[in-house]
Amino acid sequence: MKTALVIVVLIHGLIHWIGFAKAFSVGNTAEFANALLKTVGLIWFVTGLLFIVSALMILFKKEGWPIFAIIAIFVSQILIITVWSDAKYGTLANIIILIAAIIAFGTERFENSYKKDVLSAMESTSMAADLVAEMDLEPLPPLVQQYLGYVGVVGKPKIFNFKIEFEGEMRDRGKDWFKFTSEQYNFFDSPARLFFMKAKVKGLPTNGYHRYTTEGAYMHIKLLSLIPVVDIDKPELFKTETVTFFNDLCLFAPAALIDKRITWETLDDTSVKATFTTNNTSISAILYFNEKGQLVNFVSDDRLAIDEMKTYPFSTPASKYKNMDGQQLPTYGEAIWHYADGEFVYGKFNLKSVEYNVNEFK
């Protein structure tokens, strides 16, 4: 789609230079039946240049191209009207580019709210140079110690934040799977989870932003980044997103399990119960481990199913451990609701990258 748009915008811009050529009697410009003033020809040239700049900005993924394109479209359409019989078909190209520019503008604006939150969280995060030591693991249950030993956290920097990227599939009950990509930043001293997802639902671009901070939690999902389809900002969501935040910590930032806000209870030879408390909210989960020391499942009863606004058991079985940024992490996981009528897998996640203690937006 991006390549096609670049080609359309570029060709449309170059065509505008025919008006410049006509005004200055350069080459064969039979497309225009009547002569054009040189001042008008210069406007055709500048308009074409704006389209070309827009095409290059799209190609190199530069923000702000919709502004250039919309200005060019406005001037272009005025020019087309003045020579309607010669250039009327340029209106179709303007409409196509305008639709793309409006969607892109909405996407940039929506995504910038996420970027702004990430940068704000980074500014308030101080990172020390401390390393995880063996003594940091001593208060933990043996199963958790074994897990952190398998992951390889000892001797690594203590974690203050991380950036993580996924790709996968999601669905709602009774609906088809849709593919998505996502990136998120998690911060631990002052807990925050900032998750931005890009997807196509029935072929239409649909983006979502989940924001969880000490101030509260909300979920915004917008069709074409313009039309709200989910807009949830309720107090109940904070506890739910605390579960999600803690789930991320357990699976993708295990070094942070030395945090004193977590209390532990050993249940048997393969499982422990963890309780995480923040902002006067406590959530619990049972962590299951295999004989290798891998965390293979996370189960909590404290998460709210948004479609029904009820709590159901929630689990995230994880597998395919690989070395990621120097640690052994699961690279595949599922998100499952355990409804009264059976299990429902609503998310499949493939870990693409992880980076710890990030000090700039990337």
Image (cartoon, grey):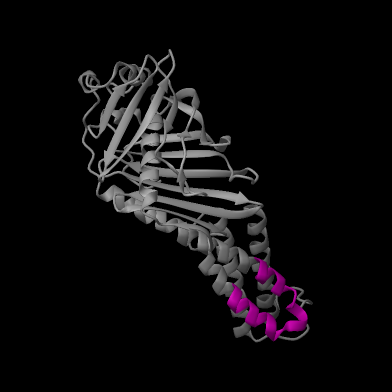
The x, y position of residue 138, in whole percent, is 22, 19
Vertical position of residue 338 compared to residue 233: above or below: above
Q: Is residue 20 shown left or right of residue 274?
A: right
85 within the magenta span? yes
Q: Quadrant of residue 276?
A: top left
Q: Nearer the viewer, residue 172 or 201?
A: 172
Residue found at x 26% / y 29%:
263
Left or right: residue 166 compared with residue 191:
right
Q: Image quadrant of residue 50? A: bottom right
Q: Nearer the viewer, residue 38 or 88?
A: 88
Image coordinates for residue 248, horizontal then vertical, percent: 40, 36
Please name whichever residue, 221 or 127, is drawn nearer the observer in this view of the structure.
221
What's the residue at 31%, 37% (across, down)? 357
Residue 70, image x, y percentages: 56, 71
Q: Does residue 32 appear in the picture of this structure? A: no
Q: Is residue 345 in the magenta section? A: no
- State which region is magenta: 73-96
Is residue 128 depicted above or below 134 in this figure?
Answer: below
Residue 277 shows in the view:
yes
